[in-house]
Every structure is written in structure tokens, then in C-alpha cells.
Amino acid sequence: MTAASTRMPSRPQAVWSAGRADLDGLPDAWGVNIAYEAVDRHVKHGHGDRVALRCLRADDLVRDVTYADLSRASNRFANALRRLGVGPGDRVFLLLGRVPELYVAVLGSLKAKAVVAPLFSAFGPGPVTQRLRLGDGRVLVTSADLYRRKVATSRGDLPALRHVLLVDGPAGDSAGRGDSGDLADAGVAALPAVLAAERDEFEIPPTDPEDMALLHFTSGTTGTPKGAVHVHEAVVAHQATARAVLDLRPGDIYWCTADPGWVTGTSYGIVAPLCVGATVIVDEREFDVGRWYATLAAHRVNVWYTAPTAIRMLMRAGAARAREHDLSALRLVASVGEPLHPEGVTWGEEAFGHRIHDTWWQTETGAIMIANVPGMDIRPGSMGKPVPGIEVAILALGEGGRAAVRHGAVTEIVEPDAVGELALRPGWPSMFRGYLHAEERYEACFAGGWYLTGDLARRDADGYLWFSGRADDVIKSAGHLIGPFEVEAALLEHPAVAEAGVFGVPDPIAGELVSARVSLRPGYEPTAALRRELIGFARKRLGAAVAPKFLDFDQQLPKTRSGKIMRRVLRARALGLPEGDVSTLDQPGGAS
Ligand code: PRX
């Protein structure tokens, strides 16, 4: 091992300078705005007729939205925000499924220099209102049903929330004011009526590349969710990685299956593909093996960005199902979000004639950092190598299982194949600029000149990186990052629960499933009925994607001397593993 180097290579910066030069920039040198790069410049260059969004609706209809349509619609949205008094830096939250209005709202907000904060529409009312509160949400764009089920009852706790725009109603008057029943709260309006009243033209104001553009909530081991702040400059990395990693070209048909409520669905479901002038498939419906293959074939998808959970579900159905379809248009299949096991990589070859390219990144990194880029020799199970412009280190671990920091310094492991904490040299354009209202948590992510990812990995002698697990207790279930603290807090709201510990257990399809152990207050019996009640209670608050799938009772939850519940010991107990050796528990489906 050697001491951490302090060298600041010039090559990475040169890569990003070239990436910056590849953007148009706002007219009259007014800066850089993501929405301009993603939409308006294509119209300016004469490509307004190209299809930007191919929307596959739940009713089976297909609706195409051209770049010119999207430019006009987002202009109307930006004008509407201005009319509502929503300005630069104000937060616009989105709680929507995969519908075209979502894209219009994202791009229109960015044009108006408001900050876009996506929410996962499968979250229950608890996570939704908590994030709205933490992010000072001023506008919420959603549907009448989602608003009724997830926000309406907490409206009184959200004083900053001034405007709710419903994509499907209520029926409003020409000024867009809603007037029906329980939706008549102040500020609830019908988005179609609001947009109809606006002009098609909007001049994007000067935008500093460092202006805040996106706010993505993510979870840590403890405390409330963290709002990772991203700026307009991030578009440099989105465009560069779209080309270098996803091999996206103008006019390509591209499908990113990630939900737009998470960072992948925004960075690579909206910004990156539109920047390169691709046509984005927007599929309103949920996963279905037959329909997914039919979609790839019917729309002649060229580049497909998906996730290991989906790949495992497709694998279960058998490669023959894929071969029933003409997938000859597919040029590249890539994966992200959780470990892609080696069998998944090679199965791609059997099913589509292409090995699947694994990529690695995080909410905080904003864009792909490590990848199996096109043309590279893929080693099944490896995340690949750092993309151009990114410098990576493996740092020696300390007692807590994270990188050891002594007097502000860390130790870089240079010999191959030793597991340590994966770290990145700060300075890439899409790096988060902070956690909203949480400066200390942000500072804690850096040591010795590195950004510490919280992931454990090793690098082989040829520079390939291999994921070996998380250094903390966060759970990855079906690609969704779940903070155990948030689940524990919801369980503790139930009068029967004295203490709760939440952890992930391996699952062959979802990677991990959320599991809980609780101790009960006096007077409560650990019955099957109470177990069902507690799971139902958590589901109602958190939503099915986040709530525990399993729950057990334990009056002696294992704790550290300071009284912290030891989630890793709980996990070991649940799996029947020796409790003393919890550090070696690998992620399920782990690539190493
Ligand atoms: O643990 C890593 C895992 O997902 C985490 C980031 O999750 P999130 O912030 O929700 O970002 C989603 C956008 C990618 C990482 O810290 N992860 C991501 N990609 C991979 C992965 N684990 C293994 N292999 C990957 N390719």
C-alpha cells in the first residue's frame, strides 16, 4: 500500500473541457441550461420534426412528440411557472408515472430555472410528504389520484407548497383553477388548462452552469433522506456518457426502463438521450415479459438501458422468449443499479446476441462513472473501468468497515484484488454540489481528496473493477435504494412497536428484500395477526416498494454498547449465518 497520492491529473479535466465544447450553450453566451441542450438546440439546428418521445400509453395507443412539440410545450410550462410566481431556485416536485406531461414539466421547470425534484410514484404518503417538506417543495405536478392518496391529507404540514398541478384534472376554468370537491384546496389546478392559457415562446434566462437544476433524494443508513443537489453543468457528463458509454447517436431509438422517480430515469431516461437527439420510448405500463420483447421489436430499439432485476425476470422466462422476436435493431444493451451477475452478462448473448454492458454510478455522481464501454473486452461480473475523465481509487478500510481516515488522510490500495472502499476524485461535471440543508453530511462524504462512495470494490491487475457490497446498511431492492432508518421510523409509529431493526435479505430476483425485526411494548403479543397488521401498517405509510416483506418478533434485539441496533447481526441471524462474522456477508447476486 502507498500513501494517498495528491496528484490531480490533467487528462480528466481535458476530457470534460472537450465535453463542454460539445454543447451549444445558450444564445448570446447566456450560459448553459440543460433544457436548451436537450431540446431547443435540436429545433434550432433544423431537427424539430424528429420524434423526441414515443409514448406507449396504457390504452395501447402510441403518441409521438417531436422535438418541436416538446420545445413548445415546455415553453408553455415555463411561462406558467413564471405566471405563478415560481422562479429560479424554487423546487418543482414531480409525482407521476411515465406520461408525457412529466417530460414537459421537467424541461419547462429547467427552462424557468426552477429546480426539478422527482418522486417515485410508488412511494406511500410518508416518503412523499417527508421529501416535499425536506425539499421545500413549492410546486407539485401529479395526478388527481396520486394527490388524493398521497398528499391531500398532509397538505396542512406543507406550508411551502403553493401550487399543485394535476395532469388529469380537476376540471378547471379557463384560468386553470380547480373547482371540484376535495381538490378545491388553494392552489390545486388542472395542468392542461394552465398550459392552454400560455404562449409557445419562452426565452430561457441567463443560466450559470453552477445554478441548481435537479434535486434527487437518496437514503443513507441513518437520518432523513438526503437531497442531492445537481447543477446545469451536469449536462456535460450526461451528453458525454450517452455517447461514450451508451453509444447513443442522433435518431437512435432508445429505451431506459428506469422509473423517472429515480435518478437513472431522469439522467438517462430524459436528459442524456434527448441531448444526443435520440427518440425516447416512454412506456406507461409496468414490466411484462412478452410486452417488453414486443416493444423492443416493434419500435426497433437500438439502445436499451435496463437493470439486473428486470434481466433476472427475463432470464426466468427463458432466452427462447427473446428469440421469438426480431431484435436485430438492438446495438447495445446496458445495465445499472445493482450487481449484474456473470450469468446475466452472458445470457444477453444467448437472448439478444449481445453481452450486457454493466455500468456503475450513484445518485451523488449524477452520471455513469464506471462502465463496460462499447468495444471493450467484457469480463462478466465486472462493473468495467472508469469512464474517460474519471479517476478511481480503492481505499484501505478501517474498523467501521469504511475507508480508514487518519489525520484527514486515506490510504490507497495499489496492489490488485484487495477489497476496499471505492472512491472517486472530485471534479467531474455531474458531481452533486451538496445535500440540501445538510452541509455536514456532505462534508462527511470526502476525505484525503476523494469522494467516498460507500461501496466496497476491488480492482484486478488489468484495472477492471468488481463490486463486492455496500459498506453501510442501505438496502437495494429491485434497484431501489432504501434507507433502513426510514422503514424503522415508520414501524415505530405503531403503538405495539418498542424497537425496530431493518435490513436486506437476499432474493434471487429483486437482489434484496426488506426485512424487519421488532420488539414489542408491554401488553402486546407476538401473533401472526400482529405481524400482518404491522406489515400492512408500514405498507400504507411507505408504499409496497419500501415496506418490509418479512417481519419477525425479537424481544432481545442485538445492540452495540452505545445502544445502536446491529442490523448486520439481525441479518446474519435471519440467514442462519454465524453472528461473529457479519462483515463477509456479500450482496446477493454479488458480482464478486
Ligand atoms: O451500491 C451501488 C449500487 O447502487 C448504488 C447507487 O444507488 P442510487 O444512488 O440509487 O443510484 C442509482 C443510479 C445508478 C451504488 O452505490 N449500484 C449501482 N450500480 C451498480 C451497483 N452495484 C453493483 N453494480 C452496479 N453496476
Image (cartoon, helix red, strand yellow):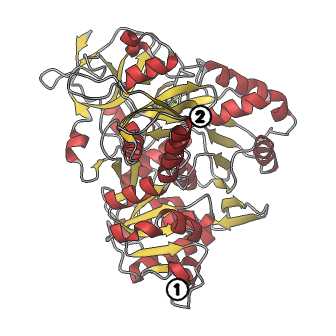
Q: Would you say the residues marked 1 and 2 are in contact, meaning their CB atoms lie under 8 Å apart? A: no
Residue type of the residue flagged with mark 2? Ser
Residue 61: x, y in percent? 78, 64
**Does mark 1's beta carbon lie closer than 8 Å to ligand 1?**
no
Q: Which residue is label 2 attached to? A: 335
Residue occupying image coordinates x 53% and y 69%: 148
Residue type of the residue flagged with mark 1? Gly
Residue 485: x, y in percent? 36, 39
Extreme left residue here? Answer: 407
Residue 469, disc: none
**Does mark 2's beta carbon lie closer than 8 Å to ligand 1?**
yes
Extreme front residue here? Answer: 523
N-terminal-most mark, 1 or 2 = 1
Residue 429: x, y in percent? 36, 45
Using the rendered image of the protein, determine whether residue 47 is visible from the camera's viewpoint.
no
Residue occupying image coordinates x 35% and y 24%: 556
Q: Is residue 80 above or below residue 111?
A: below
Density class for disc 2 (Cα within 10 Å; few <14, some 14-19, many ≥20) is many
Q: Which residue is label 1 attached to? A: 176
Density class for disc 1 (Cα within 10 Å; few <14, some 14-19, many ≥20) is many
Q: Where the N terminus falls, by quadrant?
A: top left
Residue 476: x, y in percent? 49, 34
Question: In the figure, residue 417 lies in which quadrant?
Answer: top left
State the SS at label 2: strand
Of 364 and 259, the residue lying toward us: 259
